[in-house]
Amino acid sequence: MSDPTEANEPVESTGGSAAERRVRVVLVDDHRMFRTGVQAEIGRTEQTGVEVVGEAADVDQAVTVITATRPEVVLLDVHLPGGGGVEVLRRCAPLMADAEQPVRFLALSVSDAAEDVIGVIRGGARGYVTKTITGTDLVDSIFRVQDGDAVFSPRLAGFVLDAFASTDAPPVDEDLDRLTQREREVLRLIARGYAYKEIAKQLFISVKTVESHVSAVLRKLQLSNRHELTRWATARRLV
């Protein structure tokens, strides 16, 4: 996981314009240190105009905090315990559709996998940026999403254009399409080296359920063990 304070440049006020505007933001990411870093980087409201009004570490927390605070923009990680960013988007669909006070979502993820990008955009997110983004560019992206613009890190926009070029566009990865959302979450955690107990804790499920998901993934992908699974996931940049 990238250190948000390592690659980001200091956020400076550009002629006072950022400070004159205000945008209320909720941070959703399962890594507390990353949330702390983002908060420190962009949450200096007088300089950036960004007011962080809430944080969440999993799907249930996210839905609760977003519903309670009604921010203009949510910075949403793609891989979250409880169903992932797509599940947050699904459960917050009425808030996104509110004509008077819409909640808009900007995905902020370490992943630049095509299926992650397309998944959250189909779910209703207004943009997708990776965690290598600088603090200055992240603030700019937040305000652009607040204004209703679509924002993407370089090269990611191409995934979306290809996917939505026609209504009968082929799936990005036929093998991945065989997996359920939960199976994909387990796949990524296995590929990152998590033990079954750690995965169970992350996803709020039993170890036995994790084992069942792993067996299903191996069967669907026609792989023999977790080492082959890790190589498969790494080759597709899913880790």
Image: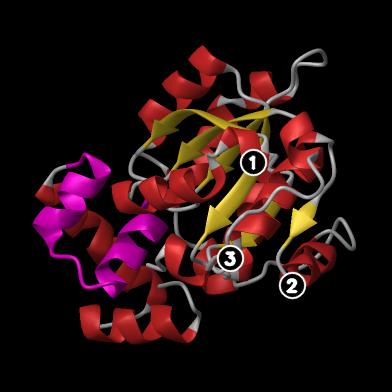
Check disc 2 and report the residue beneath it.
Answer: 154
Labels 2, 3: front one: 3
Check disc 1 and report the residue beneath it.
Answer: 47
Quick check: 45 left or right of 206?
A: right
| Residue 139 horizontal/vertical position (percent) | 67, 48
10 Å neighbourhood of mark 3: few (<14), some, or many (≥20)?
some
Identify the magenta region: 182-205
Magenta stretch mostly in which secondary structure? helix
Residue visible at 69% across and 58% down in the picture: 137
| Residue 42 horizontal/vertical position (percent) | 56, 46
Numbered mark located on residue 101 in the image = none
Q: Whole-Å distance between the Cαs marked 1 and 3?
A: 14 Å
Quick check: 95 left or right of 2?
A: right
Labels 2, 1: front one: 1
Residue visible at 30% across and 74% down in the picture: 191
**SS at circle 1:** helix
- Residue 189 colored in magenta in the image: yes
Residue visible at 67% across and 35% down in the picture: 49
Q: Whole-Å distance between the Cαs marked 2 and 3?
A: 18 Å
| Residue 78 horizontal/vertical position (percent) | 50, 52
